[in-house]
Amino acid sequence: MNIFRSAFLALGTSVIGTTLLSMPASAIDFGFSFENALNSGGSVTGVIRGLEEGTGAATSVEVLSNTTGYGIGEYVGSPSSNFWTVLGGNLVAFDFFSFDINNTPPAVTDATLFFDSSEGLGASFRAGISNIPNSITTGTSTVTTEDINLTFNRLDDPESVPESTSVLSLLVVSAATIGTKFKRKQA
């Protein structure tokens, strides 16, 4: 009976540890804001969801507000481009285009949204939203990076998320404590 409990304790700890170590990385979400200086003006805010460390696609890009009133909603219906690079928890490069006519509801079908981190006509870290079907201005020599004022803020607090190794250590210590209590009860 003692061997059975010890084997069960070891097996249970191994399964839990393996599960925790094989869990996917947690998603990183960013809020954004920009001045729509390239396309009809206004201030735009929103959120980019589902990014991970490295380069990959967002699971959601959503405009939450636009002072000009159009284009509010989800944009990851059928984006033409959806690449975001997160390094050290910071958004450092991106290329996202979602043309309204390519989207199907519930994605936004009345506006085109873009984000581009590369240099173009004197501006980098550019973004814009347009309500002209399948059309958007992505750069002009009269609009600078400062005019667009694209900013990102990380929405989750990486300090509050425990690392999987910390959780694993806690579980191993807990399992050892429970195992010790089983041994004491048998004696």
Image (spheres, grey):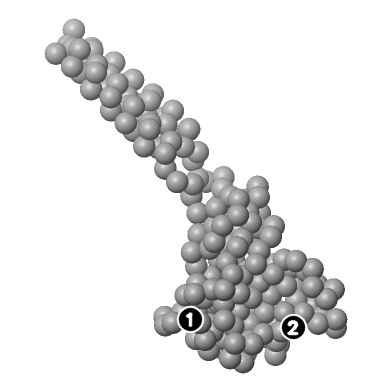
| Of residues 143 and 46, the one drawn nearer to the viewer in this rendering | 143
Tell whether 13 sits left or right of 53.
left
Other residues around mark 1 within 10 Å, as few (<14) / some (14–19) / many (≥20) = many
Q: Secondary structure at mark 2?
A: loop
Q: Is residue 112 above or below residue 12?
A: below
> Residue 101 at x, y = what percent?
52, 86
Q: Quadrant of the C terminus?
A: top left
Circle number at residue 37: 2
Tell whether 40 sits left or right of 110.
right
Circle number at residue 103: 1
Q: Quadrant of the N terminus?
A: top left
> Residue 117 at x, y = what percent?
72, 66
**Residue 73 visible to an observer of this rendering:** yes
Tell whether 10 sits left or right of 47.
left
Looking at the rendered image, the disc whose residue lies closer to the viewer, 1 or 2, is 1
Q: Residue at x 57, y 67 (%)?
A: 82
Q: Residue at x 61, y 60 (%)?
A: 84
Q: Earlier in the sequence, mark 1 or mark 2?
A: 2
Q: Secondary structure at mark 1?
A: loop
Other residues around mark 2 within 10 Å, as few (<14) / some (14–19) / many (≥20) = many
- Image quadrant of residue 148? bottom right
